[in-house]
Amino acid sequence: MVEIKQEDGRKGKFDIFVDEKLAGTMTYTWAGDNKFIIDHTEVLPGNEGQGLAKKLVLAGIDFARNKKVKIMPLCPYAKSVFDKDDSFKDVLF
């Protein structure tokens, strides 16, 4: 089972768990009240190739849409997700 948990704050993160074990993390930092910066996305060794990093970015996109804020994807992986799919442009800063 895959589960994503979020910790929000000035610096926040999304953790992804596979069978209740931490499998990856995406961190972000708020830049004002209307946008946050995705600064790092990482999948832990042994969890590659399952689409977990993309699930983390998608969780960030859902969060941004719900909060009506924008995302600045400075993390190279997150930027590549935005570059490949125009349907995420509504939250792109």
Image (cartoon, grey):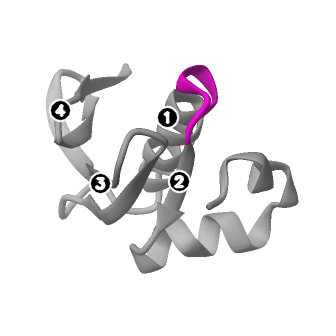
Query: Which is nearer the N-term, disc 4 or disc 1?
Result: 4
In three-dimensional space, the C-alpha distance between marks 4 and 1, rounded to whole angstroms, equals 16 Å
- Residue 37: x and y in percent read 38, 59
Q: Which mark is residue 71?
A: 2
**Badge 1, how many Cα within 10 Å: few under 14, some, many 20+?**
some
Residue 83 x/y as whole percent: 72, 74
Q: Residue type at mark 4?
A: Gly
Residue at the spot of label 4? 9
Query: Taking 19 as reference, is 34 above or below it?
Result: below
Pick whichever of labels 4 and 3 is earlier in the sequence.
4
Q: Which type of secondary structure does the marked residue at label 2 adopt?
A: strand
Which residue matches tag 3?
Answer: 47
Mark 1 falls on what kind of element?
helix
Q: Position of residue 33 (x, y in %)?
A: 39, 39
C-beta proximity under 8 Å, tags 2 and 4:
no
Mark 4 or 1, closer to the camera: 4
**Viewer-nearest residue: 60 or 93:** 93
